[in-house]
Amino acid sequence: MERGKMAEAESLETAAEHERILREIESTDTACIGPTLRSVYDGEEHGRFMEKLETRIRNHDREIEKMCNFHYQGFVDSITELLKVRGEAQKLKNQVTDTNRKLQHEGKELVIAMEELKQCRLQQRNISATVDKLMLCLPVLEMYSKLRDQMKTKRHYPALKTLEHLEHTYLPQVSHYRFCKVMVDNIPKLREEIKDVSMSDLKDFLESIRKHSDKIGETAMKQAQQQRNLDNIVLQQPRIGSKRKSKKDAYIIFDTEIESTSPKSEQDSGILDVEDEEDDEEVPGAQDLVDFSPVYRCLHIYSVLGARETFENYYRKQRRKQARLVLQPPSNMHETLDGYRKYFNQIVGFFVVEDHILHTTQGLVNRAYIDELWEMALSKTIAALRTHSSYCSDPNLVLDLKNLIVLFADTLQVYGFPVNQLFDMLLEIRDQYSETLLKKWAGIFRNILDSDNYSPIPVTSEEMYKKVVGQFPFQDIELEKQPFPKKFPFSEFVPKVYNQIKEFIYACLKFSEDLHLSSTEIDDMIRKSTNLLLTRTLSNSLQNVIKRKNIGLTELVQIIINTTHLEKSCKYLEEFITNITNVLPETVHTTKLYGTTTFKDARHAAEEEIYTNLNQKIDQFLQLADYDWMTGDLGNKASDYLVDLIAFLRSTFAVFTHLPGKVAQTACMSACKHLATSLMQLLLEAEVRQLTLGALQQFNLDVRECEQFARSGPVPGFQEDTLQLAFIDLRQLLDLFIQWDWSTYLADYGQPNCKYLRVNPVTALTLLEKISREMKDTSRKNNMFAQFRKNERDKQKLIDTVAKQLRGLISSHHS
C-alpha cells in the first residue's frame, strides 16, 4: 500500500514538471528552447511528455478554429465595401486626367514665359556673382602687382611682407580660382628668389668687410693710439678736482650708441653714424666705413621666412672661414714692420666688425661665438708671432713690434677681449729682444776693443779732462793736481764700454714701457739683462781679446788696469738703474749686478795670459840655448841667450809699475819658476847622454846670472831672498856635483835641515849617470876626472858606490 502511495506521488510530481516545461516552451523564444527539451530527454518520462504535448496542441487548434469562426462575417463585409470603392476610384481617375489635359493646354504659354523669366533671372544672378568675385580678385591682383614692383626695385623686405599678406589674407578668399593656384604655386619660388637675392647681398657684404678689415682695423688702432696719447697728456697734467676717463669708459659711450641704433625695420638699415659733429677730425669708425644694412635685411628676411637658424649658421660659418684666412700670416711678415701692422689691422678689423654685429643684432652672433673665435685667433696669432719674431735679428724691429703688439692688445681690450696672453707672450719676446740686444752689443764691444790703442788717455786741457770725467765716473785727486798734459790710467775703451752699458740699460727700459709691469718687475728685468750683458757678452769679448795670438804684454797690462776701473764703476751702474726704476737696491728680491765678478774674471784671465805669455817668451829664448855638454873648457861669463833673456825680463817688469803689486810679483815669481824648471829640464834632458865638469861649470854660471837677477829685485815687494827660492833646486844640485859633497848628502838625507834638502835622489842619479858615461868613454882624451889619473879605478868605483847608494835611497823611498 505504501508502494502504491509512492508511485502516485511520483506520478503527480512528473505531471507537474511536464506542465512547467510546456509553459516554458510556449513562453520561450525558439532559439533558446534547446536546454528545455534537453531536460525532457534527460528524464525517463518523455513518452508521457509527448502525449501531453499532443494533447496541448489539439487544444490550441480548437481555440484557433473558434476564433476564426467568430471574425469571418466581418471579413466578408469588408471585401464587399472594397469592391464598391474601386468603382468610384475609377471615375475619379478619369475626371482628374481630363482636368490635367485641359490645364496643360491652357498653361503652355505661361510655362514658356516663366522659362524666359528664369533665364533672365539666372543671367542677372550670374552677372552679380561675377562682379562680386571680381571685387574679391582685384585686391589680390593689386597686391601681386605691388609685389612684382617691389621685387623689381629690390625692396625685398617689403616684398616679403607683401607676399605674407597676399598668402595669408587675400589668396584664401579666392583660392578656388585657377590664377590663384598659379600664384600659390609661385609663392615658394618668390620666397626662394628673395632668399637668393638677399643671400647674394650678404655675400657681397661679407666680401666687402673682408676687403675693408684692414682699413677698419687701422682706424680702430688709430683711435686707440689717440686715446692713449690723450691719457698720457692727462697723466702729465696735474689732477685738479677731476679724474681721468679710462679708455674703456670712452668706448662705453661708443658701444651704447651702437646698441641704441639696433635695426627694427627696413628704414633702419644698420648704417650707423656716431661721429662727433664738433670734432671734424675724428677718425671714422667701422660703421662709417662699412654699410651693415645688407646683413640686417638678410637677417630680417630669413627670420620672417623661418630660416633664421640657417642664416645664423651660414653667417658664422663664412666668418669662421674668413677668420682663418685673416689669421694666416704672410710668409715674409717678419721682414718689415708693415707686414706685422697689416696682419694686426686685419685681425682688429675682423673683431671690430663682429663686436659691432654683436651689439646691433639680436642673436646673430653671441658672446660664446665671439669668445670661441677670439680663443682661436689668440692661439694662432701668438703662434704666428712666436714663429716670425724668432727671425728678427734687429732689436729696433723687435722694439717696434712690441709697441705694435701693445697697441693691438689695447685696441682689442677696449672691445672687451681678454689680452693677458698677448702680454704674457710679450714677456717671451722680451727675452728674444734681450738676445738681439746682446748680439748687437757684442758687435759694439768687439769694435770698441778692436779699435782701442790700449794706451792711457792723454788730455791736454781742462775741457778734455772734464769730457772724459763726464763720460766715466773717475776721481783721482793726485791726477787732478798734475799739470797738463797728463794721462788717465785707463784707455779709451773704459768710458766707451761704460756708456754702452748705460745705452743697453736704456734699450731694455724702452721695451718695458706699456707692459703694465711694476717698478720692481722692470728693475728685475733690467738687472737680469744687464747681468747677461756683463757676464756673457762683455766677458766673452774681453776673453776673446785676451786670448788673441798677437796680444802683447803691454796690451794685457792695460786690460788689467781697465778692468780694475770698470769694476770700481759697477756701483755707479747700480745707482743708475736705481734712478731710472725708483727701486732701491735694498729692496727684497732685488737682483744684484755681477759686473764685479765679470771684470775680476777678465782681469784674472789677463793675468794668466801674462804669465803664459812670459813663459812662452822664456821658452823662445831657451830655444836659442846651445850648450856643449862635452866641453872641457871652464867659462867665465854667462851664456849670451841668458843675458838677453834677463834683459828682456828686466824691461818687461819695468812696464808692470801700473799693475797691482801682487800681480807684478806673481808674474815675476812665475817667470823665475818657469825659467828654473826649464833649465832643470835642459840639464836632465834624455838626449844629453854625457856631460863634462866644464859644461856643468858653464851651466852654473848661467844659474848664478839668474840668481843675480832675482836678488836685484826686478819687482818691488818681495821679502829678502824670496825670489831666489825659485832657483834653489838648481843651486843645491849644482853645488852637490861641483863640490862633490856626496858624503854630506848621503849622511844628511831625510833630515829637515840638511844642506841638500831640495836635491831629489832620482835627479842626482840621472845626472851622476851622465857623468859616469862620460868617464867610461875612453875615446875622449879630456876626461872629466883627468886630474885624478893616479887612481882612476878607485874614482870609478866611488861613482858606482854613490850610484848604488842613490838607488838604495830611491827604492827605500818608493817602498
Image (spheres, grey):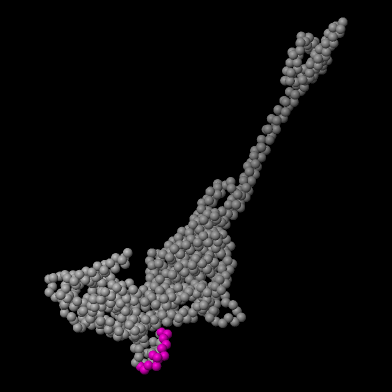
Point out the stretch of residues depicted in magenta: 472-484
| Secondary structure that dominates the magenta span | loop
Residue at 26% across, 74% down: 743
What percent of the width, then of the height, locates residue 70? 83, 15
What percent of the width, then of the height, locates residue 658? 35, 85
583 up-or-down from 378: above or below? below
Q: Nearer the viewer, residue 76 or 505?
A: 505
Residue at 32% across, 76% down: 754
Q: Nearer the viewer, residue 558 or 189?
A: 558
Q: Classify residue 538 by image quadrant.
A: bottom left
Residue at 43% across, 70% down: 431
306 up-or-down from 115: above or below? below
Q: Nearer the viewer, residue 455 or 378?
A: 455
Residue at 61% across, 49% down: 173
Q: Nearer the viewer, residue 585 or 672?
A: 672
The stretch drawn in magenta includes residue 522: no
What percent of the width, then of the height, locates residue 556? 32, 80
Residue lying at the far right of the rendered structure: 1
Q: Is residue 574 left or right of residue 542?
A: right
The image shows a total of numbered marks equal to: 0
